[in-house]
Image: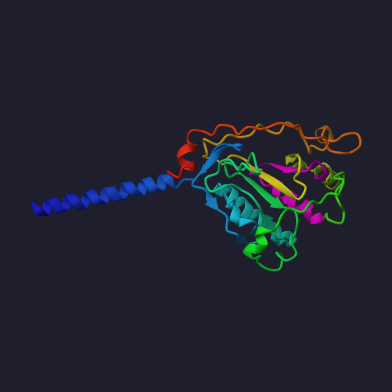
Amino acid sequence: MKLIILLIAALSLVIIQYSAKTTASELSISESIGSYTAGCIRNSAALSIDGEGFQVIRPGRGRYYGNPETIEYIESLSKKANKELNTMLLIADISQQTGGPILDDHSSHQIGLDADILLWQHPIAKQRSLTITEREHIHPQSVLTDDEMAVDEFKWDEIHGEILKIAASDTRVDRIFINPVIKRKLCTEYPGELWLGKLRPWYGHDGHFHVRLRCPKGNSLCESQKPIEISGDGCGSDLSSWFRPDGTIKKKKSGYSQQKKLPAECAPIMNGIY
């Protein structure tokens, strides 16, 4: 009788362990949930603060998490740019560990599919790994003139255009936000090239570019953004609509943008339940 009880107990333990493993496996699946401006990430992946061709800046903000697809994209982009252009990319904000709103800086960056990458090639970062203190004090350096009407030729390097070309040419990229003045510059340097169509003019973004990836395959709760409604390089009326006759960028419409409601699936994730 005692032997039977021991056998039953042992069998129960095996079943419990198997169930636990199955549950853990299921819960470890990463997924972007919701939209770029209202969502979260289940089981995000962390980008190493150092990698081949890149370094993370301001890691104390805890915004180096993303969908595994984003992490792999950054790693492959950095490696390719480093090999072909001898660059060292400085990676800024991706998302918080659980995603969700970043109230002080971004309306997007909520589902781990957005990433800010500096244009600036930091001279010291190209020589060695930056210290944590150094990283915390690095910010994007504008490549525009003081009046913001043109690209400053003393700050601009052809490498910037080549980095953006590599970044936009990846099929995982949905769009890249960049200052209209920079887009205009690139339209003259790469006339007619279709990757330019992924570069979307937007305010700011004069010292960094903002990559947005498509919803990864299998992320059924991820909401895709409306497709870009232009054909070709987007260097015609789509771009010119951003400028006044005097060459200045039209002012952004003022108004408070309220945070959208997050999907119900985000509540337990944001609360640390899983």
Residue 124 visible here = yes
Q: Position of residue 122 (x, y in %)?
A: 74, 61
Residue under the point 75% across and 59% down: 121
Give 69 or 254, whichever is nearer the viewer: 254
Check if residue 151 falls in the magenta segment: no
Residue 264 appears left or right of 192: left
Q: Position of residue 182 (x, y in %)?
A: 81, 45
Q: Nearer the viewer, residue 34 or 82?
A: 34
Residue 255 occupies quadrant: top right
Quarter containing the C terminus: top left
Q: Which residues are magenta?
A: 157-182
Q: Position of residue 18 (x, y in %)?
A: 31, 49
Give the x, y percent position of residue 50.
61, 61
Residue 254: name its quadrant: top right
Q: Is residue 20 above or below residue 256?
A: below
Q: Is residue 10 left or right of residue 151?
A: left
Residue at the image position 49 percent from the left and 47 percent from the top: 43
Residue 53 appears in the figure: no
